[in-house]
């Protein structure tokens, strides 16, 4: 993304935002199932802990990607 002009960077930022929106809920159903005790016992508990951690990590990465793209867009000069 080093030499993108403002219009191209805007398109990139919008695409990243759409991808983030599309994937934000990717692990939501699994997390909800685990909250409703879909699996029980030690294995279920480990899986529940892991899927919630994975959801947080995914959302953190998506948030960071959107933030970084928007920062880059904001740093580009407006060209007349």
Image (spheres, rainbow, N blue to C red):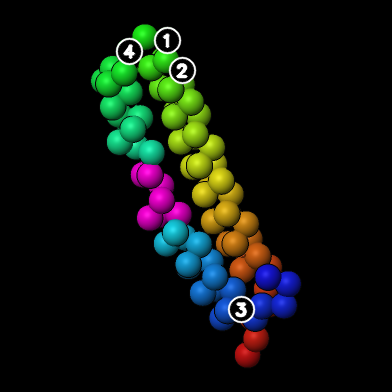
Q: Nearer the viewer, residue 1 or 5?
A: 1
First in sequence, mark 4 or 3: give its number.
Answer: 3
- Label 3 to label 2: alpha-carbon separation: 46 Å
3 vs 2, front mark: 2
Examine the rendered structure and indicate whether residue 25 appears above or below residue 8. above
How many C-alpha atoms fall within 10 Å of the one at disc 4: few (<14), some, or many (≥20)? few
User: Disc 3 marks which residue?
Assistant: 6
- Label 2 to label 1: alpha-carbon separation: 6 Å
Examine the rendered structure and indicate whether residue 23 appears above or below residue 77. above
Q: Give the range drawn in magenta.
A: 20-26
For label 2, the SS is helix
Examine the rendered structure and indicate whether residue 29 appears above or below residue 40. below
Examine the rendered structure and indicate whether residue 33 appears above or below residue 63. above
Are dots 2 and 1 in contact, CB under 8 Å? Answer: yes
Q: What residue appears at the point 46 percent right and 36 percent down from the top-left corner?
A: 55
How many C-alpha atoms fall within 10 Å of the one at disc 1: few (<14), some, or many (≥20)? few
User: Disc 4 marks which residue?
Assistant: 40
For label 3, the SS is helix
- Label 1 to label 3: alpha-carbon separation: 52 Å
First in sequence, mark 1 or 3: give its number.
Answer: 3
- Label 4 to label 3: alpha-carbon separation: 51 Å
Q: Nearer the viewer, residue 2 or 70?
A: 2
Q: What residue appears at the point 54 percent right and 56 percent down from the top-left corner?
A: 66
In the rendered view, does 9 fall on the left or right side of 29?
A: right
């Amino acid at each position: 993304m080093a030499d993108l002009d403002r219009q191209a960077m805007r398109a990139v930022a919008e695409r990243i935002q759409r991808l983030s929106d599309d994937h934000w809920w990717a692990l939501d159903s699994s997390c909800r199932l685990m909250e409703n005790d879909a699996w029980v016992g030690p294995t279920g508990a480990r899986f529940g802990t892991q899927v919630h951690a994975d959801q947080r990590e995914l959302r953190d990465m998506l948030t960071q990607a959107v933030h970084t793209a928007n920062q880059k867009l904001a740093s580009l000069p407006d060209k007349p």
